[in-house]
Structure formats: C-alpha cells, structure tokens
Amino acid sequence: MSSTPHTRAHADLDLAEIATRATHLYEYATTTVPDVQDDFDHLAGTDVPALIAELRRTRATLTTLADRWEQMADHGDVAIGTFNGPAAATLDAEVGERGRTYRKAAADIRDVLRTGRVPHDLMTDAELEQHGTAEESPR
C-alpha cells in the first residue's frame, strides 16, 4: 500500500520536510489567493516554526529523560550485591526489578521517538487507565 504524507507514520515525517512543505504551500497560496496572504504569512512565518521548535524541544526532553532513567538503573546495578543482612536478597531483587523498569521505560521512550508509535503494552495500560476494564465499565 502506498503512503501519502497524510497517512505515513510519524517516523517518516521529518521536521525539515514539514517546514519545506509549509514553505511551498505558502508560496503557492500567496500567489494564487492573494487575499489570504496575511494568514499564510502568520502560518508559515510563526505557527509552523513554533510548532517545529516545540516538537524538537519535546524530543530533546524525552531523550534526556530516557538517559536519566538509564543512569538511575546503572546506579542501582552497582548497589546489587552490596547489601548485608537478612534482607539483602530482597533488596537486591527490588533494586534489580527497579532497574529493569527504568530501562524498559527508557527503551519505550526511545521507541516512540524512533517510530512515532506508542508500544502496544503502553497503549493498553493507558487505555485501561482511561476506560477501565470491561467489568468496570458502566453498561
């Protein structure tokens, strides 16, 4: 199935490509429909660049968050095996599980940034949180 710019996955949409398409649309619209030039000036000169900048900031923030979660997991890994006493095995297991959770969260963020799609298990969790289970939903 062929894809158009409107149906492609987010991963296929490059921000520079979006800006280029907006510029071409602006050029076309302002020469063919001159009475909307002010609107297109605002769209191409302000709105699109602001949205692209916000997307870049969001992507950078999410990447930093994923890096921090991996660092937290790494710090926990260092502690495993250093606990003493009767609770040492339990603490090791808890720290290990926490590290796996941090790493999975970081991997999920990187996957969303790479593909533009929310992993199935995260979507399922989000849907359940929003809508509840079939047993919980009102009939």
Image: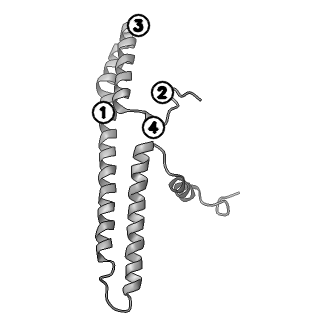
- For the residue labelled by badge 2, is the local secondary structure a helix, a strand or a loop? loop
Tag nearer the camera, 2 or 1: 2
Vertical arrangement, residue 91 with respect to residue 125, above or below: below
At 39% from the left edge and 13% from the top edge, which residue is drawn? 29
The three-letter code of the residue at mark 1 reads: Ala
Q: Can you tell which of label 4 and label 3 is closer to the viewer?
A: 4
Provide the secondary structure element on which disc 3 rests.
helix
Q: Amino acid at mark 3?
A: Thr
**Which residue was labeled with disc 1?**
50
Q: Are marks 3 and 1 in contact (CB under 8 Å)?
A: no
Q: Residue shown at 44%/34% (left/top)?
A: 12
Please report the residue visible at 39 percent of the width from the left and 12 percent of the height from the top.
28
Q: Residues within 10 Å of mark 2 (few under 14, many from 20)?
A: few
Q: Which mark is residue 32?
A: 3
Image marks 4 and 3: residues in contact by CB distance under 8 Å: no
- Residue type at mark 4 is His
* Mark 3 burial class by Cα count in 10 Å: few <14, some 14-19, many 20+: few
Mark 4 or 3, nearer chain start: 4
Do the CB atoms of the residues marked 2 and 4 lie less than 8 Å apart?
no
Determine which quarter of the picture holds residue 104.
bottom left
Disc 2 to disc 4, C-alpha distance = 10 Å
x then y, percent, for residue 22: 37, 22
Of residues 133 and 37, the one nearer the viewer is 133
Secondary element at image label 4: helix
Q: Is tag 3's residue or tag 1's residue first in the polypeptide sequence?
A: 3
Residue highlighted by disc 4: 10
Q: Nearer the viewer, residue 119 or 128?
A: 119
Residue occupied by mark 2 = 5
- For image coordinates 40% across by 45% down, the residue present is 113
C-alpha distance separating marks 2 and 1: 20 Å
